[in-house]
Structure formats: C-alpha cells, structure tokens
C-alpha cells in the first residue's frame, strides 16, 4: 500500500485566496472549502516514507520509557509515535496508563503501537525497583526542587540501559519511583504555564537524552 500523495491548492476567489493541502485526485479539493469557489494546484508535494530504524539499531540504543499512571490515551499514543521515531527500545505502561487495546490510543499512535514492544505493570514502584536491580539507569522527568535542568545535566556518567520516566498529568511521578531514580531532570520554561504537556515534554527530553548519550559513547 502506497502513501497518499498531496498537493497544495489555492482558491481562485481574490477575496478568499485560501491556500491549503489536499489529497491528489480527490474531486472535493476542486472547490474551496471556505467559499466554494474553484481552486487550482499551486504546488506538488513529493512525499515519501522515511526508512524505518532497523530492529538491530533500536536494540543498540537500549533506552526505554516508563509511563506511570498517565490518564490520557492520546498522550500515551503520542508517546508511542515519538518513541518509534526516536528508536526507544520498549515502553513500560504502569498503573492506569492506557494500553494499545484502547481505541483512543490509535488516533495519535498511528500504528506505532503495533511495532514498538511494550509491557503493562500494575505497580510502577515495583517495576522501578526491578529495573534498578538489573542495572538500569532510571532518570525521571519532573519539575521539582532539586531537579537538574536537562540542558545542564552531566552525561559523562550516563549509560545504557536507561529508562526515562514520566508521570501522571496532574500529580507527576509517583514519589516511590522518584526514590529509585538516580537522577531527576527538568525542562526549563519561560512562559506562564508551570509545565509542558507530558507527551511534548517526553519528546523534548527523550530526543535530547538519546542524542547526548550517543555523542558521549
């Protein structure tokens, strides 16, 4: 199955002039979705599927994610999609975090949940203890006093396997899990809000951590 092709269209009504993307060959885009005037193609999009990270490459990264008690299936799905793109080796879903059998998760995971290894654990603290006992490095993403701004963190002692932990959208990471973590990192913010959306925060942190670890190897 090939990926759908898209073009950019422009409304021929000077008072409107809407410019928008539409799937190639679909009759509906012959008219403007706002004013219903005729449209014409102004640019073609040469889309293609990027090569997927091979399973061997994913294993070499050995960075996993622990999602503790996330409420939103959309957030979890978004993290699945980000994790697939970054080469995260596995996702641990803990507590009430939705699993891929939740139909809402598919809306943002877009199939990433089908290829990315995952496990569900009722108790995130017990999992954290087990991972730590097996030599995993646990880093929690949490904005609390004492947390190290991620861009100031020392990666010289960072090693794999590593687990990046994120917590509940309202109350954050379980204190019992934080006690097991060797490091707590935060993302500096300049706006009026106190935190990023958890899926956005995970994407920022995971991308930075993965690239810094690879750079120090």
Image: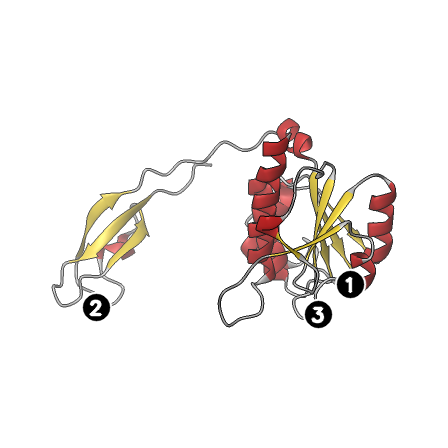
Specify the quadrant of the image occupied by residue 57: top right
Q: Are marks 3 and 2 in contact (CB under 8 Å)?
A: no
Q: Is residue 104 visible?
A: no
Q: Which residue is mark 2?
A: 35
Residue 76 picture location, percent across and down: 63, 56
Cα distance in 3D space between marks 1 and 3: 8 Å
Q: Quadrant of residue 39?
A: bottom left
Q: Residues within 10 Å of mark 1 (few under 14, many from 20)?
A: some
Q: Is residue 38 above or below residue 88?
A: below
Q: Is residue 97 left or right of residue 41?
A: right
Give the vertical position of 188 relative to 5 (above or below).
Answer: below
Give the tally of numbered discs: 3
Residue matched to label 1: 174
Q: Residue furthest top?
A: 56
Q: Is residue 42 visible?
A: yes
Residue indicated by mark 3: 171
Seen from the viewer's position, the closer of residues 84 and 64 is: 64
Q: At x 42% / y 40%, what residue is drawn?
A: 3
State the mark number for residue 43.
none
In the rendered image, residue 177, in percent from the top left (x then y), is placed at: 80, 57
Relative height, residue 68 to residue 81 (above, below): below
Which colouring convention does the figure follow? Answer: secondary structure
């Amino acid at each position: 199955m090939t990926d759908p092709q898209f073009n950019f269209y422009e409304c021929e009504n000077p008072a409107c002039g809407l410019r928008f993307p539409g799937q190639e060959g679909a009759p509906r885009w012959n008219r403007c979705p706002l004013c219903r005037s005729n449209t014409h193609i102004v640019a073609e999009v040469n889309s293609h599927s990027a090569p997927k990270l091979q399973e061997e490459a994913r294993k070499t990264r050995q960075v996993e994610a622990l999602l503790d008690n996330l409420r939103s299936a959309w957030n979890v799905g978004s993290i699945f999609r980000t994790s697939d793109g970054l080469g995260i080796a596995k996702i641990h879903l803990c507590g009430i975090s939705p699993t891929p059998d939740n139909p809402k998760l598919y809306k943002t995971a877009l199939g990433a949940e089908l290829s990315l290894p995952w496990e569900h654990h009722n108790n995130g603290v017990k999992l954290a203890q087990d991972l730590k006992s097996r030599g995993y490095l646990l880093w929690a993403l949490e904005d609390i006093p004492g947390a190290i701004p991620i861009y100031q963190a020392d990666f010289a002692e960072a090693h794999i396997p590593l687990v990046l932990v994120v917590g509940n959208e309202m109350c954050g990471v379980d204190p019992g899990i934080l006690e097991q973590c060797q490091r707590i990192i935060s993302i500096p913010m300049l706006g009026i809000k106190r935190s990023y959306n958890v899926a956005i925060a995970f994407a920022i942190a995971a991308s930075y951590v993965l690239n810094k670890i690879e750079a120090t190897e």
